[in-house]
Image (cartoon, rainbow, N blue to C red):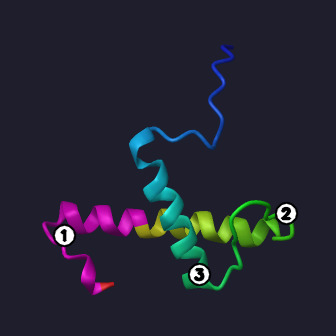
Amino acid sequence: MSSNNSGSNRTNVPEAREALNRFKYEVANEIGVPLKQGYNGDLTSAQNGYVGGYMVKKMIEEQERKMAGKSDTTTR
């Protein structure tokens, strides 16, 4: 097995790192999770998982819109 240091926090497209970070805080705010810059060890794993899961849901919805030819994101 190779040890290529592929951690789960790696961004596949480094240029998107800042946009993903902003998206994370936008989603956390939208669902009421008090995510803040820096240390968030006071949040439960359920809260953190909810943020990540909701991010994935929204990204999939956006991709489905694009695939269907409906790139207008104002209909959320």
Three-letter amino acid code of the residue under disc 1: Ser
Q: Rounded to the nearest whole Å, what is the CA distance between mark 1 and mark 3?
A: 24 Å
7 displayed left or right of 64: right
Residue identified by numbered label 3: 29
Instruction: Please tell me which residue is depicted at 36% across the width and 69% down the height of the picture.
Output: 61
Three-letter amino acid code of the residue under disc 3: Asn
Q: Which residues are magenta?
A: 59-75
Q: Point out which mark residue 41 bears.
A: 2
In the orientation shown, which residue stands out farthest toward the left?
69
Of the numbered discs 3 and 2, the one sitting upstream in the chain is 3
Question: Residue 19 sits in which quadrant?
Answer: bottom left
Q: Indicate the position of residue 14 as horizontal and vertical percent values.
A: 44, 39
Q: Indicate the position of residue 18 as horizontal and vertical percent values.
A: 47, 54
Q: Nearer the viewer, mark 1 or mark 2?
A: 2
In the orientation shown, which residue stands out farthest toward the right?
42
The answer to whether the residue labelled 1 contacts the one labelled 3, judged by CB atoms less than 8 Å apart, is: no
Of the numbered discs 1 and 3, the one sitting upstream in the chain is 3
The quarter of the picture where the C terminus appears is bottom left
Label 2: which secondary element: loop
The answer to whether the residue labelled 1 contacts the one labelled 2, judged by CB atoms less than 8 Å apart, is: no
The quarter of the picture where the N terminus appears is top right
Q: Point out which mark residue 71 bears.
A: 1
